[in-house]
Amino acid sequence: MKHPPAMAGFFVTNSCILFPFANYLFNLTVQLFYMNPIIKTGRLAIFLFLFFTQACKVAWVPDYSAAIEDQIIATAQKNDRLYLDMLDVSAPNQYTFYVDRYNEIEAEINSIQLKNEARTNNTDMLKIIKNLKDAFQTYRTEHREKKTLKRGEVLVYQQTIKGFWTPLLIAEHGLKLAK
Amino acid sequence: MNFDINEIVPQMVNVIKDTVKKDWKEVKGNATNFLHARKDRLDLLASMRLQNEIEQEFFLKRLNDEKKIFESELLSLKIVSLAIAQKAANAAFDVLNKAIESALKII
């Protein structure tokens, strides 16, 4: 009995391992070719070999989503606007005045988190979102407890939360490079 | 069958090099932007503290936030780097597949 070439093992262990179903079909094809005497035509087996190896691409990051990138930009903008409005001297700076907007932004962050939970290879994205969400909730809680914020505190919140949004946007935008 | 792995491997390496070289500027640019943004935030934080616009406790909490921001920045650079590596690896596999395909046409 012939044995499968060394390259077959390479694809099975390194590339197709990411796709269990394709891996199963590939192994089946190899077995069919090398064990079934009916199949004599090399072309068919090689065609099947190529068919399954072509389907095997490495995937280390989630697929890019224009919708998620747009949502990140829009929510970061709302978050920035929240603090800009607090800096406006004519606007009241009391927590109760901003509750609805805090809720709206937190709901958007939750939505971004949920969409990322449904993606594959999402561990790093979820950690970035968790850092952002923790910071947002901390600043919100501090505002609620203090009831009003000083101008200096608002300025620092505005810049710091931007520091959490930027890596998330860059990561999502960077996913485009995978294609 | 006209298939020489010794010719294919250098082609795969070249594809990887070209892909990474082209996109690496993006990672470098992002890392530089992160550094500039950090400098601006720390400038603001220090000046607000010196002007007594923020309390010491608030100052220390936000200084601690910088560690988390740094973690997020490193993770985002990791994601971008992985995306580039993924593209390069798949491009290299394409070279191999195309070489096998063209060798088969000769049979």
Image (cartoon, rainbow, N blue to C red):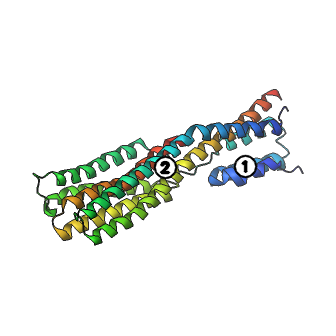
**Cα distance between the residues tagged 1 and 2:** 35 Å
Residue at the image position 18 percent from the left and 55 percent from the top: A86
Disc 1: which residue:
A11
Depth check, front residue: A60 or A95: A95
Q: Which residue lies furthest to the top in this view?
A: B106
Depth check, front residue: A11 or A1: A11
Q: Is residue B15 left or right of residue B10?
A: left
Residue at the image position 40 percent from the left and 62 percent from the top: B66
Q: Which residue lies furthest to the front in this view?
A: B50
Picture quadrant of residue A33: top right
Q: Where is residue A154 in the image (x, y as percent from the top left)?
A: 23, 58
Chain under disc 1: A
Picture quadrant of residue B61: bottom left
> Disc 1 or disc 2, which is closer to the eye?
2
Disc 2: which residue:
B31
Q: Is residue A86 left or right of residue B19?
A: left
| SS for callout 2 | helix
